[in-house]
Amino acid sequence: MSLLPTYPLTQIVQARPFIKWAGGKSRLLAQYKPFLPTDFERYHEPFLGGGALFFYLAPQLQAQEKRAYLSDLNPELVNVYRCVRDEVEGLIEQLAVHKELHGETHYYEVRSRLQTEPIARAARFIYLNKTCYNGLYRENSRGLFNVPMGRYKDPKICVPDLLRAASSALQIADISERPFLTVLDHAKNADDFVYFDPPYHPLSETSKFTAYSRDRFTAEQQTALKNAISQLATRQVKVLASNSDCPFIRELYEGFEIKTINAARSINSKASKRGKITEVLVIA
Ligand SMILES: C[S@@+](CC[C@H](N)C(=O)[O-])C[C@H]1O[C@@H](n2cnc3c(N)ncnc32)[C@H](O)[C@@H]1O
């Protein structure tokens, strides 16, 4: 037995997104920082995805004993977050097995085999997320994950310290599968802060790129989101909302405070289209 002292690694590793997710906000957080409120008790993120802003705020939320309400419409994603919060060691064990077996045969076998047990489902999701082409979550019309294997030298299939840090951060979180409008049932007054990061409105007809098949996020839904934000504002709820920088969104949010954010999109397959893209951050 080692006589060396052991230190809880979760306190050293800073929690950050543990999955790759289209529209992930990690690179933009520095630009959001000046607009993040500090005087609130409850944090809500109803389009959770990779949860970049939640993990960024987590140390502060934890230190001040605040609660987080995280939700998304994607049931697989919600199951992963719950398993990371509640069953992280079991999940790490299963990911270690995937890491060991990783290869073309294993990938396609895992891809074709649906799981029902929550930890196995979560391990399958993370394994495919880390090894699939471009890390894109995409399903076919029958709801099956159909992305081919990616070519990575050393995919980060099992990173125990990162998962434990995420698990520790998620202890303050309620995690649920529900549509974004239900945030109206939870965010009630000036003690609430809501960050909305919906699927972006397409910049043009040709850029109608939908990374997540479940969410055809229509112009009507963008309008419903804007109306929800107006309603929250009348309750003094603090709101930030990201979206694409296009005439439709700028017109929709006329009268709101709008900040322009510089974003380089790595998701665009054409190198020439990467970079020099702006997004908007709506403040209410
Ligand atoms: C742009 S991503 C969020 C990215 C996230 N902020 C990050 O940093 O990774 C949008 C998310 O909204 C979810 N979504 C789409 N339609 C929704 C709806 N109607 N209600 C709730 N969530 C929805 C998708 O499953 C997806 O995870």
Image: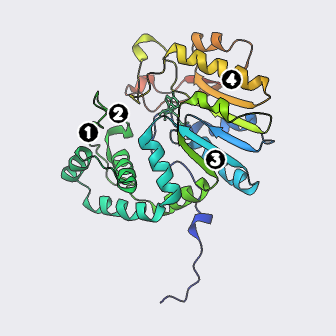
The residue tagged 3 is 56
Q: How many marks?
A: 4
Identify the residue at image location x=35%, y=33%.
138
- Quick check: 46 above or below 18? above
Whether residue 284 can be seen here: no
**Three-letter code, disc 1:** Pro
Q: Marks 4 and 2: which is nearer the front? A: 4
Q: Which of labels 3 and 4 is toward the front? A: 4
In the picture provided, is 119 more to the left or to the right than 50? left
**Residue 121 image position (x, y, % from top left):** 36, 50
Residue 229's disc number? 4
- Quadrant placement of the C terminus: top right
Dot 2 or dot 1: first in sequence order is 2
Q: Secondary structure at mark 1?
A: loop
Crowd band around label 3 with a 10 angstrom C-alpha radius: few (<14), some (14–19), many (20+): some
Q: Earlier in the sequence, mark 3 or mark 4?
A: 3
Upstream in sequence: badge 4 or badge 2: 2
Q: Which mark is residue 128?
A: none
The amino acid at mark 3 is Tyr
What whole-number distance in Å separates the C-alpha atoms at marks 2 and 1?
A: 10 Å
Disc 2 secondary structure class: loop
Query: Which comes before the other along the chain, label 3 or label 2?
Result: 3
Dot 1: within a 10 Å radius of its alpha carbon, few (fewer than 14), some, or many (20 or more) residues?
some
The residue tagged 1 is 148
Q: CA distance from mark 3 to mark 1?
A: 31 Å
**Image side of residue 155 versus residue 20, left or right:** left
The residue tagged 2 is: 138
Examine the rendering and report whether any part of residue 27 can be seen. Answer: yes
Question: Residue 148 location, x and y as percent?
Answer: 26, 39
Label 3 close to label 1 by CB (< 8 Å): no
At horizontal 54% and vertical 18% (from top left) the residue drawn is 221
Q: Earlier in the sequence, mark 3 or mark 1?
A: 3
